Image: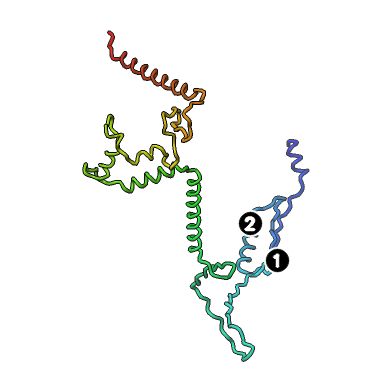
Amino acid sequence: MSRADYLSKYLSGPEEKKKKKKSKKGSSATNVAVIVGGVHSMKDEVESQDALLATAQDGENEYLPAKVELPIASKENKGFKRIDNGQISKPMETQTVAKEQPKTVYRDQSGRIIDLDTKRQEMKEKAEKKALEDEQLRDQINTGDLDKLSREEKSQAESEAKRFAYATTDKQYVDHMKSRRHFEDPMASFETTDNSRQETTTKIGRPVYNEGIHPSNRFNIKAGYFWDGIDRSNGFEDRLLEKRNQQYVQKVTTKASLESYTEYDFE
């Protein structure tokens, strides 16, 4: 006999007998496990858990809370009891249709009702009228007498304008042709027209100098009525006009020479 067999035979303890535990009825819901030879049996534990669940579903376990379903009672509104005669008055039925919201009423300081649409229209018209008046006042301040007169003449000419061309027998056409001065007209010196007043006065009625030649200037302003005919300037206006004329002539001649040079085709 080997040494290992000898030790296993004489040193191991006696075999323990298997013991079974009986479960009591109505016991608490605890897990029951059976130990066989020092080893925990999982099969017995699962069987005990299934038994506990079955008893819990059947309602036999007194330790689990019981579920009680109560019917929901609808509370009836019986109304209110009157104090004077003791009769019960039923509540009024709620209206399903919502009423229209009342419009907001606006009033002024005196208490009169104000219509917002009418008030807005009045304020708009007042603002437009004020803007038009301001524009007219600004135009009147920035416009001189001569500009006003020219505008009036233009508006009058537009109002008197005709749609069709003038005929040679038209009175307005004949007066216009008679007012024109022709070169070497022998009767021009004997003819008296209203143009004499226009030559001695401006369009706004102010007198001008008509005794001789007016000195030239870049603004084409005529001499005053009380001018004695003596030129007291330093000659700046004459030199300026002369220089401008020279520049214009040089520009025209240069352009003409370039155009004439390009006419020839050199091969």
The quadrant of the rendering that contains the C terminus is top left
Who is closer to the viewer here, 182 or 68? 182
Q: Which residue is mark 2?
A: 46
Horizontal arrangement in the rendering, residue 109 relative to residue 95 (left or right) = right
Who is closer to the viewer here, 249 or 267? 249
Residue at the top extreme of this rendering: 267
Alpha carbon of mark 2 to alpha carbon of mark 1: how far?
A: 17 Å
Q: Which image quarter: residue 104?
A: bottom right
Residue type (three-letter) at the residue carrying disc 2: Val
Q: From this view, report whether residue 219 is shown above or below residue 82.
A: above
Q: Residues within 10 Å of mark 1 (few under 14, many from 20)?
A: few
Q: Residues within 10 Å of mark 2 (few under 14, many from 20)?
A: few
Who is closer to the viewer here, 149 or 247? 149
Which residue does the image show at 27% across and 29% down from the upper left? 184
On the image, the x and y values in percent for residue 7 come to 76, 40
**Which numbered dot is residue 180?**
none
Name the element at disc 1. loop
The quadrant of the rendering that contains the N terminus is top right
**Which numbered dot is residue 27?**
1
Residue type (three-letter) at the residue carrying disc 1: Ser
Which residue does the image show at 75% across and 36% down from the upper left? 3
On the image, the x and y values in percent for residue 130 come to 50, 54
Which residue does the image show at 52% across and 68% down from the upper left? 103
